[in-house]
Amino acid sequence: MYQFNFQPVFDNLDLLLYGAWLTVRLSFLAMILGLVVSLLGAVAKTSGIRPLRWLVDVYVEVIRNTPFLIQIFFIFFGLPAVGISMSPNTAALVALVINVGAYGTEIIRAGIESIPKGQIEAGRALGLSPVHIFRYVVVVPALRNIYPALTSQFIYLMLTSSVVSVISANDLASAGADLNARTFASFEIYLVLTVMYFLLALGFSTLFGVVRRAFFTYPASR
Amino acid sequence: MKLNRRLFTALAASSLALGLAMPASAADLAAIESAGTIKVGMLVDFPPFGIQDASGTPDGYDADVAKALAESLGVQAQIVPVTGPNRIPYLLSGQVDVLVASLGITEERAQRVDFSAPYAGISIAVYGATGTEVAEPADLAGQTIAVARASTQDTGVTEVAPEGTEIRRFDDDASAVQALLSGQVNLIGLSNVVFLQVDKVAAGKFDKKFDLSSQVQGIAVAPGSDALLEKVNAFVQTARSDGTLDEIHQKWLGEPLPDFVKTAE
């Protein structure tokens, strides 16, 4: 029978908690920036401008059809060859934003296309300006429609961020790996990491629920 | 006649008893010499020490040393591929006569097998871009250094690095080397064996800054094979001084046998 020994984990809990904070910060920044990229991508894709659409198509297809691991290697180890050198943590953020941006573009595009033409025409009939139509008649209802898909993509992003230690970026998983290298209490450490990632995911879910109630419920409050 | 027969029986019985009293696995020098071959265990998955060439024949530093050893004994080398975990059992069970299998000399192992004087070594050192001025651990402050997480070099660097050193831990040597090659770090903790590969792809761009630790490897025989061990030791001493090992080391590792191997006992 395996003898559990959580002492090394408890002794170094501050290390793991700091790692968890890094993961939260990295994921949160990547979600915000990723949302911006996704919105821009979706707008470009649904716009009538052909070259722009093709450009976004290439971006989305390349990112969605290659492994994230290769993308992050490319950004960290490959780009310095052309003079673009980033610190591991920045490279990790950039890779995550680029990755989630591609998936988000497709998700939000689907949302925008789900808006009936008549709804936009109704907006025009009411005399709303194009900016208002875009904001209240297209984007907010579109986000409402695809909200669950987008937020689960964001949770997935947070879990994916656990591989950034391959480029020596710091996060919860790398904190666990460092601790494991020192104490060899693998089973205990990874068990605790599992629980911590689960709690982080649960936390993000709750946050998304709050945001949803505040901004995306019917009747639209603003 | 009768006496002779009795004498013969007694002799046979006593030699049998002697034979049984000795560990069954000890290699018998006379048997090796009369058979004309020595069975040498070596790794074939540890480049450049032990590899298999395109036709599947074992090759590498260890293979060349094994051949030179056999030559000095006046026999043929019969190379038996072994793996890291099973190399000592192969030796102790008598399936091979000697191990030329990059076996690092440690105290634990020395209790199980008898080692010759070191014939090879691996050193861990800090390497970096030529021109980066780092000569001792204290110079690491303010520098960024890559290591493979949980490796010997990670332990070594972490131990000596002063406050203000940024240690970047990668999953393996290959990633750490990538970080060095792509200019993400200036320095790296690496073994001389892997550094040789780095120097091949980026000749002259990086050099050694300072040593961290070293590990010497010995030829191993089963306990009780004293006559054989004596011959092996004589071979190692000669080969270290007459340039045989320098030549083989130059061939596989790009430099003569390092001094820390030559001077080690």
Image: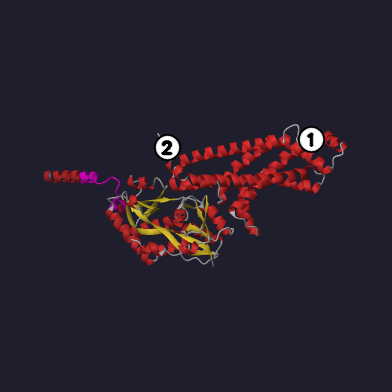
| Local secondary structure at mark 1 | loop
The percent position of residue B177, horizontal first and vertical second, equals 54, 56
The percent position of residue B49, horizontal first and vertical second, equals 44, 55
Left or right: residue B23 versus residue B45 is: left
Query: The disc numbered 2 marks a residue on which chain?
Result: A
Callout 1–callout 2 Cβ contact below 8 Å: no
| Amino acid under disc 1 | Ile
Residue marked by disc 1: A115
Name the residue located 61 percent from the left edge and 42 percent from the top edge: A158
Query: The disc numbered 1 marks a residue on which chain?
Result: A
| Local secondary structure at mark 2 | loop
Q: Nearer the viewer, residue A82 or A167?
A: A167
Label 1 – label 2 distance at C-alpha: 55 Å
Looking at marks 1 and 2 on the same chain, the residue that comes earlier in the sequence is marked by 2
Q: Give the range drawn in magenta.
A: B15-32
Name the residue located 82 percent from the left edge and 46 percent from the top edge: A49
Residue B36 in sight here: no
| Amino acid under disc 2 | Phe
Image quadrant assignment for residue B205: bottom right
The percent position of residue B42, horizontal first and vertical second, equals 41, 51
Residue B151 in sight here: yes
Q: Give the crowd class for mark 2: few <14, some 14-19, many >=20 residues within 10 Å.
A: few
Residue marked by disc 2: A4
Is B103 situated above or below A10? below
Q: Residue furthest front?
A: A221
